[in-house]
């Protein structure tokens, strides 16, 4: 299963820093770090570095998304989609740890995990809350408050171009979900039709290819979204 400034410089750049700090990319990516990177890092650390069984490592690494999903439901009355997705991946992984002794089934198991992520992304599109938007937003807003506010207006249906923006938003997640689902199908088919020694390295190629396809084809939706964000940010707003 990712400064030291002189006093005059601080004074000169303080307004710009204040405008960008609340919406910095690092802050926007924080949920992805907590919900995706931390559980993955925890799994590999526990399994590879500390020698835990695959089942135990998956169980312990699933604690973070489980807690964040529960807190979201109880405190905020909303479903944390990224945390829920990783929790689902861990649950599927736990169920599949019983698949042992057959190299082909072990290769296909990784495809099932990819499918869980892909279906979660595609399902989020149907729910009207595209999962990949939170990953894309920092790159389009670039930590700028005006762009961040424009993004929220567009995504929230409060701007003239909201319909177009939300259509491209759904398209972006659909592209990524489809790319990962295609990777899963290719991995499973390859696991049962190609030599195990070939699939041992080809499965990685499939995954890298899916990510590359998502990144390249995703621009079909990301580029229009960035233009809409720029245009909305430049539009005068009522005070």
Image: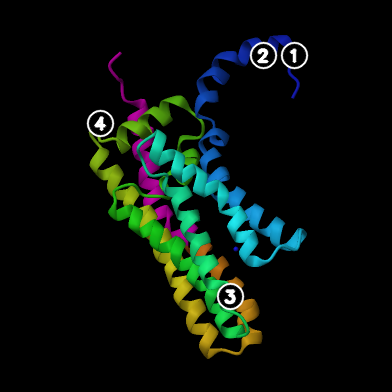
Question: Closer to the camera: disc 4 or disc 1?
Answer: 4
Residue 233 magenta-drawn?
Answer: yes
Nearer-N-terminus badge (4/1): 1
User: Where does the magenta region start and end?
Assistant: 214-239
Nearer-N-terminus badge (1/3): 1
Residue indicated by mark 1: 6
Residue indicated by mark 2: 10
Q: Quadrant of the C terminus?
A: top left
Q: Secondary structure at mark 1?
A: loop
Question: Closer to the camera: disc 2 or disc 4?
Answer: 4
**C-alpha span from label 3 to label 2:** 50 Å
Q: Secondary structure at mark 2?
A: helix
Look at the magenta stretch and give its main secondary structure: helix
Q: Are marks 4 and 1 in contact (CB under 8 Å)?
A: no
Q: Are marks 1 and 2 in contact (CB under 8 Å)?
A: yes
Residue indicated by mark 3: 203
Q: Are marks 3 and 2 in contact (CB under 8 Å)?
A: no
Residue located at (50% from left, 49% from top)? 66
Q: Is residue 117 above or below residue 183?
A: above
Within 10 Å of disc 3 (Cα), the crowding (few <14, some 14-19, many 20+) is many
User: To which quarter of the image does residue 146 belong?
Assistant: top left
Q: Secondary structure at mark 3?
A: helix
Is residue 29 visible in the rendered image? The answer is no
Q: Quadrant of the N terminus?
A: bottom right
Q: Which mark is residue 158?
A: 4
Whole-percent x, y for residue 5 in the image:
73, 18
Whole-percent x, y for residue 41 in the image:
65, 53
Nearer-N-terminus badge (3/2): 2
Q: Is residue 160 above or below residue 109?
A: above
Residue located at (38% from left, 53% from top)? 172
Residue 67 magenta-drawn?
Answer: no
């Amino acid at each position: 299963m990712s400064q030291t400034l002189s006093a005059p410089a601080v004074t000169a750049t303080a307004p710009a820093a204040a405008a960008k700090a609340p919406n910095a990319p690092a802050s926007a990516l924080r949920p992805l770090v907590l919900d995706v990177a931390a559980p993955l890092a925890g799994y590999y650390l526990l399994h590879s570095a500390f020698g835990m069984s695959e089942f135990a490592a998956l169980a312990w690494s699933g604690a973070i998304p489980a807690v964040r999903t529960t807190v979201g439901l109880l405190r905020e009355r909303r479903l944390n989609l990224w945390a829920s997705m990783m929790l689902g991946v861990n649950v599927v992984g736990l169920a599949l740890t019983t698949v042992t002794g057959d190299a082909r089934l072990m290769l296909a198991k990784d495809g099932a995990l990819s499918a869980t992520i892909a279906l979660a992304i595609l399902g989020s599109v149907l729910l009207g809350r595209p999962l990949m938007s939170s990953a894309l937003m920092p790159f389009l807003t670039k930590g700028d408050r005006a762009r961040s506010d424009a993004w929220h207006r567009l995504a929230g249906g409060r701007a003239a171009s909201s319909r177009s923006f939300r259509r491209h938003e759904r398209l972006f997640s659909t592209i990524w979900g489809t790319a990962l689902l295609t990777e899963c199908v290719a991995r499973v088919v390859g696991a049962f039709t190609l030599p195990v020694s070939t699939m041992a390295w080809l499965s990685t190629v499939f995954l890298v290819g899916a990510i590359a396809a998502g990144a390249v084809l995703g621009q079909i939706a990301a580029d229009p979204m960035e233009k809409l964000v720029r245009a909305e940010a430049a539009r005068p707003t009522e005070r």
